[in-house]
Amino acid sequence: MAAVGTLHDCLGHIRARQAPPLWAAGMGQLAAEHRHLQALVADPDVRVYGANTLVGHRDDEAVADPAAIAAEILRTHAIAGPPFYDAHAARCIGYTKLYQWSAGLSGVSPELFDAVAELVTRDDFEPQVPRQASYSCGDVIPASHWAQAVLQTLDGRRLAPGEIMALINGDFVHVGHAVSMVDKIEQASALTVETAALFHSLALANASNLYFHSTAERTWTASAVDHIRERARRPMAAADVQDPVSLRAIPQVLETWGNAAEDFMAETSYVLYHPSCNPFVDERHPFPISQASFLAPTLAIKTGGLMEAVLFLMWAALGWTKHLLSGGVEGIPRDGSTAASPLGLIQYPKLMAATCAKARLDLGRRTFAAGADTSYGVEDLWTNGALTLDQLDSGLDALHRLLCLALWVVRRVTADFGLEDRVGGDLLAACADCASATEMDRCVSDWFDSVETRHGRQGFWRD
């Protein structure tokens, strides 16, 4: 699958450290909305949330000095600490804020927009944005740390009244983290398909397993299955004994993954270029618009679907490994045992099962939306989107570890029993010098980098 639309463009500009043309396209609208915001703040009869009022459950209290309240908001909201998002995620968070500003309604000035746009494209701007500091009813705590880094780097730039809310309010931390996950998802796609091809070929599985009724809605799955079919070492034939379900279900497992990943990226692309802050500033209305665009529950739901797909992949890969070491595959003794090692690889399925079980525990509890009272009886609605993305992030790491263990089993069995003629492709060749399962991660990373070097950012997993 591929990053689509705005998300695809965003990732390209992030890699090139460029400001997208889309950012400049709406400058006229931004200027008009900023003027409208300043007129609203200047009107003594209009309450503008966070500009001439306090925030949260204190929004019924007026303040006379917008500059003082802006400083107070930052001081009282930037209260978290480590762990922090890595540099790539922090950059994606900054880009997401600019995309959402360019969609309008924030009231931010063109001058502040340009200053932040110049900042987020610089290599040396690496703000420390706390993880696990938001349940995603807005991301104001981690966002305040980001905003603080912005203002400090801009040498204490003075904000216009109301701009503090444009800086810290919205779902941009949640969405920015989702943007940063795309590379990891693409690597998981490539590694999964290549691993499935190796196991299917090495097990001399029937190509009937790869019979897949393709439709236009499942283009990526069809390409992935075709890739595995081209590597198959046994043709499609009538089966006296069926292969294990984990092998027969390769198309269905890949379809589950591809569909979930495409849904996740499509939703991320949608919310990336979407107004998100509170209040909205709309020239058509003589008052600030109170609403809840700082929530992204749709993205949280898509994240949950992708986590389910991660678990499907993990349990399928465990099934492939157990079958390969079962003693039922021609040329491979039970447990991959040899004269020098009669127990062979007996413990690897157990280690992989432990990895699967831990992932199930880590990913199994997901509360997408929950109402609760945050303080003094103020009702709230939680998407837990940022926390759910943390779960997905760790789940993708677990999937990677599991597939590396599976590849180690393939490498050992292939080398120990002279079965190189059953497998093809360059992934196993890239792992030929690995001395242990723990080195597979380095080999896999080198392989993925080499694929990108040869083909650019292309590949069947992105088509």
Image (tube, grey):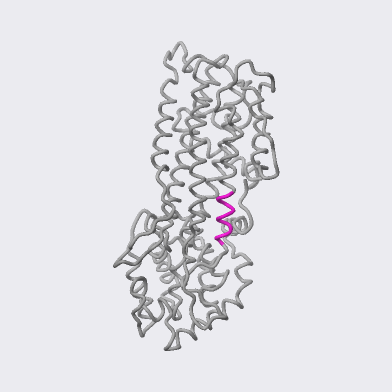
Residue 218 figure quarter: top right
Residue occupying the point 49% across, 86% down: 39
Residue located at (49% from left, 34% from top)? 314
Which residue is at the front of the view, 83 or 396? 396
Question: Where 334 falls versus 129 (above or below)?
Answer: above
Q: Is residue 90 above or below residue 462?
A: below
Q: Residue 206 at x, y = what percent?
A: 64, 22
Relative to 312, say whether 75 is above or below: below
| Magenta part of the chain | 263-272
Q: Residue 134: x and y, percent?
A: 39, 59
Q: Is residue 300 left or right of residue 11?
A: left
Name the side, left or right, on which 98 lies relative to 463.
Answer: left
- Residue 269 forms part of the magenta stretch: yes
Q: Residue furthest left?
A: 376
Magenta segment's dominant SS is: helix
Location of residue 96 in the rendering, given as x and y in whole percent from the top left corner: 52, 62
360 shown above or below 141: above
In the image, residue 403 lies at what x, y percent? 50, 33
The image quadrant that residue 460 belongs to is top right
